[in-house]
């Protein structure tokens, strides 16, 4: 048996506590040996204020998992790649395409593994949906990703700051699924982004894409109360598919499909371990590019101020 990969978590917040820590605890491939975060720590794990401090005076590590807000990820990615560590990036990998492209460029020259993750692609419905769609002819597709930001992102001020993505923070998950399952690439045609008058990022977005010349519409909303919607409907010449609950459920031609239970983060770490073992990397920037296109071409409308 090979020794576990010694890993550090950088940016200790909600997603680390709810997903990364349990996934690492259940993994034989990794051993969590340190954290780096300005203020937060994990019980029983040696803690450092920054990645530089950890690399200088912490325990030996083989890999880092970068879970800070996207605005701060690039700087640490450069430090980690330069130090020759394997790097796993939370989504979105960075908040500009140029930085993400630079990570991809450095990855190609490095012996270490870089994995730019899209956790929703590891939901159980995605691979069966991709397999079912292969070879079929798309007629139309609709995405609705509507959630209550006050429930899912309490106190996360960075989401409303420049580079924080706003409603595209969850919306990019839908685009990561869409770009993984569709046989043809997506092209943004039109976008309408609603910015609260006191925020730098949108709270809602209506997007129109084409894929293989066929319409794909997406509606993102951060003010959905009551039932939450993370659904994709796909109509083809050969039948229809509905992916719901963010990819935890799948129906084909109206028939619910049996799926394994949700295990996105265990899946991410299993994939990271495989990439490390095979000496390869996985950096797909497509979802980030689609969001960039929406910000580039999107029409801006003002929405009422957002008060948490
Ligand atoms: P969060 O709860 O705000 O936690 C982020 C943590 O990063 C903060 O607690 C802060 O720790 C730390 N941090 C801030 N600036 C830093 C810096 N310059 N260097 C290192 N650490 C820094 O946010 P989150 O929800 O965990 O989201 C983090 C990332 O995960 C985002 O990219 C998000 O899109 C992604 N994600 C989130 C979810 C979710 O449901 N929440 C799901 C999937 C993916 P201190 O307390 O130490 O300052």
Image: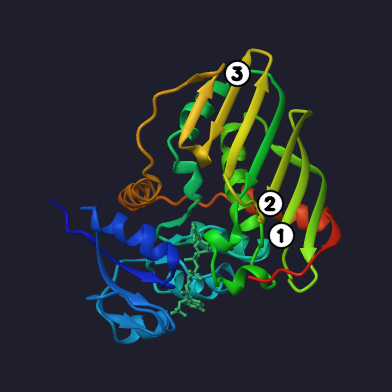
In the rendered image, the residue lying farthest to the top is 238
Coordinates of residue 192 in the picture (x, y in percent): 82, 51
Which residue is tagged 1? 203
Disc 3 from disc 2: Cα separation: 32 Å
* Quadrant of the image occupied by residue 72: bottom right
Looking at mark 3, is its residue's CB closer than 8 Å to ligand 1?
A: no
Q: Is residue 86 visible?
A: no
Q: Does residue 159 appear to the left or right of 213 in the view shown?
A: left
- Above or below: residue 126 compared with residue 157: above
Which residue is tagged 2? 221
Q: Does residue 76 appear to the left or right of 228 in the view shown?
A: left
- Above or below: residue 105 compared with residue 124: below
Coordinates of residue 11 in the picture (x, y in percent): 44, 73
Coordinates of residue 236 in the picture (x, y in percent): 67, 19
Which residue is tagged 3? 135
Q: Residue at x 61, y 34 (%)?
A: 232
């Amino acid at each position: 048996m090979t020794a576990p990969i010694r890993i550090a978590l950088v940016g200790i917040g909600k997603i680390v506590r709810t997903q990364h820590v349990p996934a690492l605890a259940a993994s034989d491939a990794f051993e969590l040996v340190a954290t780096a975060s300005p203020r937060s720590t994990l019980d029983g794990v040696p803690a450092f204020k920054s990645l530089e401090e950890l690399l200088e005076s912490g325990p030996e590590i083989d890999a880092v998992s970068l879970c800070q807000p996207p605005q701060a990820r690039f700087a640490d990615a450069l430090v980690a790649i330069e130090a020759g560590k394997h790097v796993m990036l939370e989504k979105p990998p960075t908040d500009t395409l140029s930085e993400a492209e630079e990570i991809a460029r450095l990855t190609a020259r490095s012996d270490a593994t870089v994995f730019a993750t899209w956790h929703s692609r590891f939901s159980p419905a995605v691979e069966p949906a991709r397999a079912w769609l292969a070879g079929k002819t798309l007629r139309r597709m609709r995405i609705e990703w509507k959630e209550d930001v006050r429930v899912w992102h309490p106190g996360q001020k960075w989401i409303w700051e420049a580079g924080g993505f706003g409603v595209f923070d969850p919306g990019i998950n839908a685009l990561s699924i869409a770009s993984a399952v569709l046989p043809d690439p997506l092209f943004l045609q039109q976008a309408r982004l609603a910015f609260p008058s006191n925020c730098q990022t949108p709270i809602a977005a209506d997007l129109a894409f084409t894929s293989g010349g066929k319409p794909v519409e997406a509606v993102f909303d951060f003010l959905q109360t009551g039932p939450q919607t993370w659904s994709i409907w796909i109509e083809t010449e050969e039948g229809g598919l509905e992916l719901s609950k963010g990819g935890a459920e799948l129906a084909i031609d109206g028939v619910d499909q049996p799926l394994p239970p949700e295990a996105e983060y265990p899946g991410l770490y299993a994939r990271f371990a495989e990439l490390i073992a095979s000496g390869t990397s996985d950096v797909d920037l497509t979802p980030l590019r689609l969001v960039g296109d929406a910000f580039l071409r999107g029409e801006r409308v003002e929405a009422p101020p957002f008060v948490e």
